[in-house]
Image (cartoon, rainbow, N blue to C red):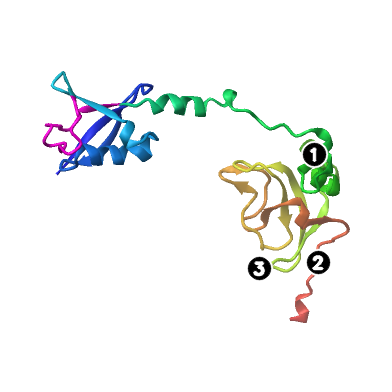
Amino acid sequence: MSVVLGILTPKAKMPLEKRFASGLTIGQLKDRLYPILGVTAESMALTATISNSSISLSDDNRTLQGYGLTNGCQVRVESKEFKDLELFNDLENVEKYVMSEEVYNKREDSFRKFKQSNPEIFKPKIVKNTNQIDEKVFKNYKIGSRCEIEADKNYGPRRGEIKYVGELKGYKNIFIGIKLDEPLGKNNGTVKGKKYFECVMNYGVFVRPYKVQVGDFPEEDYDLDEF
């Protein structure tokens, strides 16, 4: 059997709930509390609150069950070593070592030396102005321009006419809307229910600007007599 106890210390605002075996002796309980609270078992004085009565747990050989401890009972831990812990944790009272600039500058393994030896790592990063990028796209990819889409794993180069330049519903990037010369597209100029340009189904496609080259790309004349 086991029992859940609320462990209280002088500075604790809320009890720390821990489960222990009911057959555990008070001496063994103190040993369990040592790594949790940081004070030695020999310095601990335990009292328990049972039915609104305070009972001293002074017999180290007596068990938790023998003292009548049940779920929800609170055990208060007193120790003079808590004061020593407070002093230890108060960093303002700890004497600090301060290295002089002269000594620090002589060190070869300092961060300052590393920074001086690797200036390229610490150069401020230049953030591209997305507005300037968008303006460049609108300038280079004009509506009505002939273009060619670079080949990919599904298609060879595809030619067509630029019909739209801008963002698409549900996407943040700029896309080029193209009416293809052949039915090698994916739509009719519509994406997610919004119409961006008119074309026959499968003649429309939207691609990122870096895949599109604008230039003298006339519609290819297929001579059917050659087949």
**Residue at the spot x=28%, y=33% of the render?**
17
Q: Residues within 10 Å of mark 1 (few under 14, many from 20)?
A: some
**Residue at the spot x=80%, y=45% of the render?**
107
Q: Residue furthest front?
A: 42
Q: Which amino acid, by three-letter code, is at mark 3?
A: Asn
Identify the secondary structure beneath mark 3: loop
Q: Which amino acid, by three-letter code, is at mark 1?
A: Tyr
- The reply to whether the magenta stretch includes residue 96 is no
What is the C-alpha distance between the residues marked 2 and 3?
20 Å
Which quarter of the picture shows residue 149? bottom right
What is the C-alpha distance between the residues marked 1 and 2?
72 Å
> Toward the viewer: 133 or 90?
90
Position of residue 73 in the picture relative to residue 194 (left or right): left
Q: Which amino acid, by three-letter code, is at mark 2?
A: Glu
Which quadrant, please, contains the C terminus? bottom right
Label 3 sits on residue: 154
Q: Earlier in the sequence, mark 1 or mark 2?
A: 1
Label of residue 220 in the image: 2
Identify the secondary structure beneath mark 1: helix
Label 1 sits on residue: 104
Query: Which residues are the magenta region?
Result: 56-77
> Toward the viewer: 33 or 216?
33
> Toward the viewer: 130 or 79?
79
The image position of residue 115, as x and y in percent, is: 81, 44
Q: Is residue 173 visible?
A: yes
What is the C-alpha distance between the residues marked 1 and 3?
61 Å
